[in-house]
Image (cartoon, grey):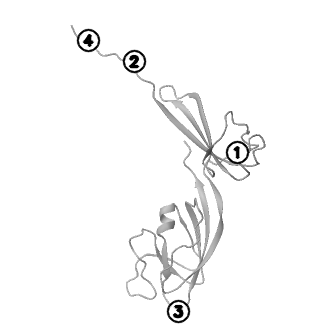
């Protein structure tokens, strides 16, 4: 006799997450204020791809779970942050001279930066292992960006490891940096 094992499959779940920004203060429970980032986590049955009804809300800024049922209304009280950037303060302007400079006033949560090059060309690295070599060197090392160019740093790691110096000449460059938190990891 041959027996096949027909065990009952155990339920398997995945979670879909969506980030929201509060558009108003939470009048019902005071668990968030205007501008806070909120996280919705919904449990989904992997076999049917249907929601199971298990839902959790959390205030990302404070780390506190939000009381259920959620009292806010999507579109009125909160807006979805799918592929959106939230501007963070402060922006900064740095002088880039013959000595390598890193970004200074990086706001908490920054995972994206738009960098404007002003006054002179720069050379940069963002791998954390290689220092830029410029300032008129015969063999410059790094990525060259000219006066007037704009480039983006696309992760917190690139922001933390950014280093730049002027490419050549005696004129110092300036870089103007705008920081954002980009939300593009919704399911």
- Percent x, y of residue 59: 64, 46
Marks 3 and 4, the one that precedes in the sequence: 4
Closest to the observer: 43 or 177? 43
Is disc 4 placed on a helix, strand or loop?
loop
Pointer 4 or 1: first along the chain: 4
Residues at marks 4 and 1 touching, judged by CB atoms closer than 8 Å: no
Q: Tell me which residue sits at (26%, 11%) in the image.
A: 3
Q: Nearer the viewer, mark 3 or mark 2?
A: 2
Residues tagged 2 and 1 counted as in contact (Cβ below 8 A) = no
Q: Which residue is mark 4?
A: 3
Q: Which mark is residue 170?
A: 3
Which numbered disc, 1 or 3, marks the residue that appears first in the sequence? Answer: 1
Name the side, left or right, on which 40 lies relative to 165.
right
Label 2 vs 4, first from the N-terminus: 4
The Cα–Cα distance between marks 1 and 3, rounded to whole angstroms, is: 54 Å
Q: CA distance from mark 2 to mark 4?
A: 15 Å
Q: Earlier in the sequence, mark 3 or mark 2?
A: 2
Which of discs 4 and 1 lies nearer the camera? The answer is 1
Choose top left, top right, bottom left or bottom right for residue 30: top right
| Residue that numbered label 1 is attached to | 31
* 171 in relation to 165, above or below: below
Q: Where is residue 152 shown, x and y percent of the image? A: 55, 66
> How far separated are the C-alphas under marks 2 and 1?
42 Å
Are the residues at dot 3 and dot 4 in contact (C-beta closer than 8 Å)?
Answer: no
Mark 3 Cα-neighbour bin, 10 Å: few <14, some 14–19, many ≥20? few
């Amino acid at each position: 006799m041959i027996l096949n094992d027909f065990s009952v499959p155990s339920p398997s779940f995945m979670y879909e997450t969506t980030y929201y920004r509060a558009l108003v203060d939470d009048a019902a429970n005071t668990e968030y204020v205007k501008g806070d980032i909120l996280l919705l986590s919904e449990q989904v049955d992997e076999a049917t791809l249907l929601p199971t009804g298990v839902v959790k809300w959390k205030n990302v800024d404070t780390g506190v779970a939000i009381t259920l049922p959620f009292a806010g209304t999507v579109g009125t009280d909160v807006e979805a942050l799918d592929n959106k950037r939230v501007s963070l303060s402060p922006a900064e302007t740095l002088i880039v001279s013959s000595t390598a400079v890193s970004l200074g006033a990086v706001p908490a949560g920054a995972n994206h930066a738009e960098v404007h090059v002003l006054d002179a060309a720069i050379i940069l690295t963002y791998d954390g292992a290689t220092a830029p070599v410029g300032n008129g060197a015969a063999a410059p090392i790094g990525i060259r960006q000219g006066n007037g160019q704009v480039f983006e740093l696309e992760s917190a790691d690139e922001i933390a490891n950014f280093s730049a110096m002027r490419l050549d000449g005696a004129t110092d460059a300036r870089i103007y940096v705008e920081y954002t938190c980009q939300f593009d990891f919704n399911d």
